[in-house]
Amino acid sequence: MKLNTNTISEKMKSVKASCGGAPFGEKRTQAWRHYNAAEAAHKANDDIKTKYELDAAKKALA
């Protein structure tokens, strides 16, 4: 299933900025792991996994 790629690209930019601006620590590390998994899924054209990993990255920073 393909989701709107413009929305995913915008979400990736937003999450990347949030990860980069987060204070160093375990939450930031976890968020970057999820973000990197989202990038890999995005390159593999797996939009659902991309969205899942981006949501997990945002949750890790909360």
Image: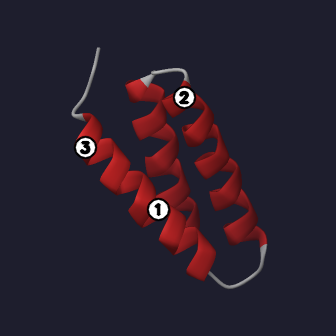
The x, y position of residue 45, in whole percent, is 45, 21
The N terminus appears in which quarter of the rendering?
top left
Q: Where is residue 20 in the image (x, y as percent from the top left)?
A: 61, 74
Determine whether, in the image, residue 51 is placed left or right of residue 32. Answer: left
Task: First in sequence, mark 3 or 1: give its number.
Answer: 3
Instruction: Decide which of tag 2 and tag 1 comes sooner along the chain.
Output: 1
Q: Callout 2 environment at 10 Å: few (<14), some (14 to 19), or many (20+)? A: few
Kindly identify which residue carries mark 3. Answer: 6
Q: Is residue 28 shown above or below 45?
A: below
Q: Which quadrant of the view contains residue 11?
A: bottom left
Hey, which residue is sitting farthest top in the picture? 1
Whether residue 19 is visible to the viewer of this picture, yes or no, is yes
The residues bearing labels 3 and 1 have C-alpha atoms spaced at a distance of 14 Å
Side of 60 where 42 appears, left or right: left
Could you tell me if the residues under marks 2 and 1 are in contact, i.e. CB atoms within 8 Å?
A: no
Residue type marked 1: Val
User: Which residue is labeled 2 in the image?
Assistant: 43
**Numbered disc 2: secondary structure:** helix
Q: Measuring from the top left, give residue 26's x and y in whole percent.
A: 77, 69
Q: Which residue is drawn at 47% across and 35% down?
A: 50
State the separation of the CA atoms marked 2 and 1. Answer: 16 Å
Q: Mark 1 highlights which residue? A: 15
Pick whichever of labels 2 and 3 is earlier in the sequence: 3
Amino acid type of the residue tagged 3 in the rendering: Asn
